[in-house]
Amino acid sequence: MTKTSWSRFSKLALACLFVLSVASVPAAAVSVGDTNVTSDAEVGTQVTATVTLTELYQNPTLESWTLAGSTELTDVTWTVSYYDQTGAKVSQKSFDGQSFSGAEVSASEGTSKVEVRITGTVPKVEQYSYEPPQSFVVMALEQTRTGGSSNAIENWTATHYTQESREARKAIADAETAVSQVNSQKAERILGNAIEAYNGEEFALAIDLAKQAQEQAQQTQQSNQLMQYALYGVGALVVIGLAVGGFLYWRSQQQGHDKLG
């Protein structure tokens, strides 16, 4: 086999392996329709999220499967509602706890749409992080086939906060805006300290440092403006000096011509 032929064979083999690998991955036989899931929430408050699943049997060989769900909310209640092709609710199941399984979905029962509703309490933040923001899983849904194989349908996350952490985050964000507009290593250093304080849950200190960083940035900006105005003034004086000098030179030349005349 020539080198060229071997290269073509290798490419063909890789292509075949890729196709086989894709084919071996179970494709989700469910589409996600309307969703109503919060993007952020305060720790300790109760939230409700709703997700609608449609096109439940995209895989022709999968006309019966089991829905499972999990969450990081606490004090949780799940409600799974089944609808037929006319949009009428035909049945409903309820589950308690941070996870559930056993919600059967079957074409033979006439189910064409499933709505999953969860109500629970936003959990406390285990580890604060300014970037990326701390988040938790509101809802994660999974499709399980007969025999145990399963694949994720989708999961939804949200950031969570306390009033103190939100105030600190806003103060830091305001400081970031101010610091980004100037070149001040001191302001950047103070801002970095504010972020470290936030990550360490020292929110009062983070707010104080963020304000210091913002003030330092504003002072630097004012100093830069004063310097710019001073340079404009010097430039104006130079222009005036040149103009006066030129005028005096011109006058002296005119006077010289008058004497010669």
Image (cartoon, rainbow, N blue to C red):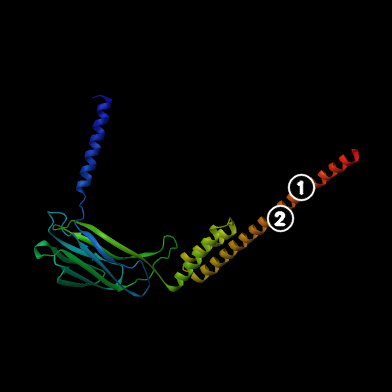
- Which amino acid type corresponds to the residue marked 2 in the rendered image? Gly
Give percent across and percent down for residue 20: 20, 43
Closer to the camera, 231 or 241?
241
Question: In the drawing, what numbered circle is on residue 242?
Answer: 1
Look at discs 1 and 2 and give the one toward the viewer. 1
x 22%, y 40%: residue: 17
Closer to the camera, 89 or 100?
89
Lateral position of residue 42 relative to residue 211, left or right: left
Task: Specify whether residue 196 is in view.
Answer: no
x 56%, y 62%: residue: 190
- Which amino acid type corresponds to the residue marked 1 in the rendered image? Leu
Q: Secondary structure at mark 2?
A: helix
**Dot 2 surroundings within 10 Å: few (below 14), some, or many (20 or more)?**
few
Question: In the drawing, what numbered circle is on residue 233?
Answer: 2
- The outermost residue toward the top is 2
x 20%, y 60%: residue: 143
- Mark 1 or 2 closer to N-term? 2
**For the residues marked 1 and 2, what is the alpha-carbon distance in whole angstroms?**
14 Å
